[in-house]
Image (tube, rainbow, N blue to C red):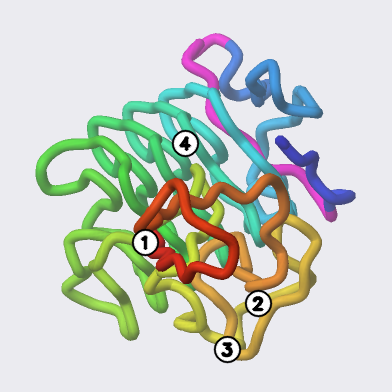
Amino acid sequence: PTRGCSAPTGRISSRPRSRTTETKTSRVRRSQNATTTATWPFSNASRQQSRNNCSISGNSANQGGGVYGGTLNNCALTKNSADSGGAAYSGALRNCTLTGNSASSGGGVYGATVRNCIVYYNIGSAASGNYDSSSVLNFCCTAPLPATGTNNLSIEPQLASMWHLSVNSPCIGKGSSDSVSGVDIDGELWANPPSIGCDEYLSDSAIGALSAAFTISYTNMAVGFSVNLESV
């Protein structure tokens, strides 16, 4: 389910498409599944604030479809769009997952400092599908592999959903402990070292119905007769 943000320490702005209101207000538009919709002042001060454990989806703007500036921790940004920075324009992102966003330049991020993040499956120009050349990425999973930065992965993150990791994800245990804060987007503790992205994979956290399939050597047999079972 979509989770709301934790109590913010400030406000993050997303530039609206209308030029007549840009210097006065900034409107963040959430999808119907989101829990909050807000209109925030658009100012230099607001860009320096932070939000934690948010799901930001289905927004659009000229710059920063999801957010413009500020700091995001443990957040998922999906299906946002903009001319520049489909998910985020400038600012800092830590342990966030950005998927399914789009922009002409920087389908995932534009001009941002990104650490411990998954920036994958975003759409942009050939040279900036996930990020633009001015963004700085460290301990991230993205493609192509950034020319600068350290400890980045270009292999696919193998997600189980838009932002949850699967058991085989190469992002598990590949993040930097220096960058984590609080808990992951599901309220679970970070491992040491943490996973890349907003979700910490825990082997005992999978719940729900279990499906299994197998073949047997015989369908009819006498009592005491051995039958071979093989998983498929």
User: Judging from the image, what secondary structure is the residue with disc 4 in?
Assistant: loop
Tell me which secondary structure the magenta stretch mostly adopts. Answer: loop
Front of the two marks 2 and 4: 2
Q: CA distance from mark 3 to mark 1?
A: 17 Å
> Which of marks 4 and 2 precedes in the sequence?
4
Q: Which residues are magenta?
A: 9-20
Residue 221 left/right relative to 42: left
User: Judging from the image, what secondary structure is the residue with disc 1 in?
Assistant: loop
The correct choice, above or below, for 137 with respect to 79 in the image is: below
Q: Which is nearer the eye, 126 or 202?
A: 202
Identified by mark 4, the residue type is Gly
Identified by mark 1, the residue type is Pro
Q: Residue furthest right?
A: 7
Q: Which residue is at a point 22% across and 59% down the rendered structure image?
A: 143
Residue 180 disc label: 2
Q: Are marks 3 and 2 in contact (CB under 8 Å)?
A: no
> Which of marks 2 and 1 precedes in the sequence?
1
Front of the two marks 1 and 2: 1
- Residue 120: % across, % down: 34, 51
**Magenta stretch containing residue 11, yes or no?**
yes
Q: CA distance from mark 1 to mark 2?
A: 19 Å
